[in-house]
Amino acid sequence: TLDSLDKAVANMQRGLKITLDARALQSKPAQLTEIKKALKPGKGEVRLLLPLMERGREMEIVVPGRYDVSPIEAGLISAMPGVLEVAEV
């Protein structure tokens, strides 16, 4: 069957990878709660990437549930304190 491009894109599984600033979160852990509160229900997956500076590694966490991962929401989250980068995946 054929679908319009808009309809096909709307049904795609998309997600966001949010890279967090470990130092900022250490000084103000409540920022993580604010990021979680900013996530609105939707169809996409959200992953948090937290650099572990002292170990030279990264930890990636999939946030339970589905969220709005639209470009507008990604832009709002990217401007929040404690967020270094937001990438679409």
Image (cartoon, grey):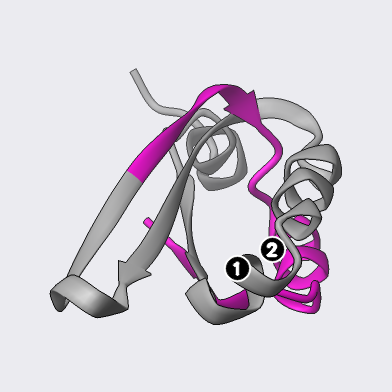
Element on which disc 2 rests: helix
Query: Of circles 2 and 1, which is in front?
Result: 1
Residue 20, x across and y down, in percent:
52, 69
Count of labels shown?
A: 2
Q: Amino acid at mark 1?
A: Gln
- Front residue of 55 and 2: 55
Tell me the quadrant of the picture where the N terminus can be found.
top left
Residue 61 figure quarter:
top left
Magenta stretch in the rendered image: 61-89
The residue at the point 70 percent across, 52 percent down is 32
Res 55 label: none
Left or right of 60, for residue 5: right
Left or right of 58, for residue 70: right
Q: Amino acid at mark 2?
A: Ala
Residue 33, x across and y down, in percent:
77, 44
- Front residue of 1 and 49: 49
Task: Check disc 1 and report the residue beneath it.
Answer: 26
Residue 14, x across and y down, in percent:
45, 43
Whether residue 16 is situated above or below residue 65 in the rendered picture: below
Residue 4 figure quarter:
top right
**Callout 2: few (<14), some (14-19), or many (20+) C-alpha neighbours within 10 Å?**
many
The residue at the point 70 percent across, 27 percent down is 42
Whether residue 76 is situated above or below residue 10 in the rendered picture: below
- Front residue of 12 and 8: 12
Task: Check disc 2 and report the residue beneath it.
Answer: 74
Which callout, 2 or 1, points at the residue further toward the start of the chain? 1
The residue at the point 59 percent across, 23 percent down is 66
Residue 54, x across and y down, in percent:
24, 77
Residue 62 inside the magenta-drawn segment: yes
Tell me the quadrant of the picture where the C terminus can be found.
bottom left
